[in-house]
Image (cartoon, rainbow, N blue to C red):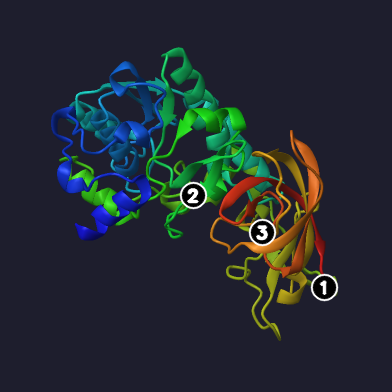
Amino acid sequence: MARLDKNIARVYGAPTMGEMTFLDGGHDAGLDTAALFDLPRAAKACRIVVAMSGGVDSSVVAALAAASGAEVIGITLQLYDYGAATGRKGACCAGDDIRDARAVADRLGIAHYVHDHESAFRDEVVERFADEYLAGRTPVPCIRCNMGPKFTDLFAMARELGADCLATGHYVRRVAGPAGPELHRALDPARDQSYFLFATSEQQLDYLRFPLGGLPKSAVRELAGRAGLRNAMKPDSQDICFVPDGDYASVVTKLRPEGAAPGAVVHAETGEVLGGHKGVVHFTVGQRRGLEIGGQAEPLYVVGIDAAKREVRVGPRRLLAVSAARLVETNRIGALPDVPLTAKVRSLARPVPVSVEGGLGSGAGCTIRFATPEHGVAPGQAAVIYAGERVVGGGWIESTEGAA
């Protein structure tokens, strides 16, 4: 409890959680949760819309919102046909999650609505995911989901409901800056989700709230337990919610059967055919396992995919070294500061020093150049650019320049 109290007080400048209760949607004046949501006036005159996925994170955000004294409305998006996913751990916005979100709303005494966005999610996220793999690229569907159903659509719905803000359970921080709100990494690096939110617009950021960005997951679960929420110990959802058992290739081939067309595994340097494969959808740049080309003198990795020729090109690790990457569909959040910049090219990668050449933002393309060669940079992934802890933008990797 001491650690939880310390985190709350340090991040929010508030009294300890020992002075606060969540039961029955009540609130305790000791903790200024209205300030936590940066409300424009007295909480009782405000309305907060909370995106409720059914997980513990968004449920605690709903509890914090209810404790502020504001009117709270929870919204859950049904994103795909959850019949097959009901009861499956690791799903997001599926059958069990919708029931959990509704149960939490009932516990807190707040309104809760479920909106069917299955068609939009399929068109904007699932179909695009399949097309990207079919083209030999490595997609990041969670970012596309945030760009579409989770932010754009929820943003519009919250506005229509007359809400003062839209709150989510993402582990990022919205920090007041000299030119307006800034997007910063979560204080707990193990939970940071800023990579997935690089496409957030300045207009969206002005309206969004992220109350959990200053807390570790253990503190969030403790808050859920104290509030009596049924999902306090619910496992975290997996990244790709619509892929049963992590078998993304089966999802892609079901949508795009041509992705299972066989082809050759070719050595990128010698041109030698080393074997065959059962479809380019089974491979991503940087992959080492599952190549089925044993007996090689040195370890080989997937260094490129030519989808048109159905070729998977492999080579030694040094061929994965990249000196620069061309970004498209870029976004900038605020002005680009005149300070050293870093970039992450995968969600779990460490930020590395980069320079930016060309325009960043408004969909314009640009090039990021790595200070030292970076490995495993794959077209289709996102590159997110940071100035210290602040997210300044990013884009989608269209192509790369080999360091060799």
Kind of residue sitting beneath label 2: Gln
Q: Is residue 232 visible?
A: no
Residue marked by disc 2: 193
Q: Nearer the viewer, residue 103 or 302?
A: 103
Q: Which mark is residue 342?
A: 3
- Which residue position is annotated with label 1? 272
Q: Residue at x 69, y 55 (%)?
A: 262
Going 35% across and 55% down the picture, which residue do you hit? 216
State the image coordinates of residue 359 (x, y, percent, origin top left). 80, 42
Residue at the spot x=72%, y=40% of the render? 330
Quadrant location of residue 35? top left
Quarter holding the C terminus is bottom right
- Evaluate whether residue 399 shows in this view: yes
- In contact (CB < 8 Å): disc 1 and disc 2: no
Tell me the element at label 1: loop
Q: Amino acid at mark 1?
A: Glu
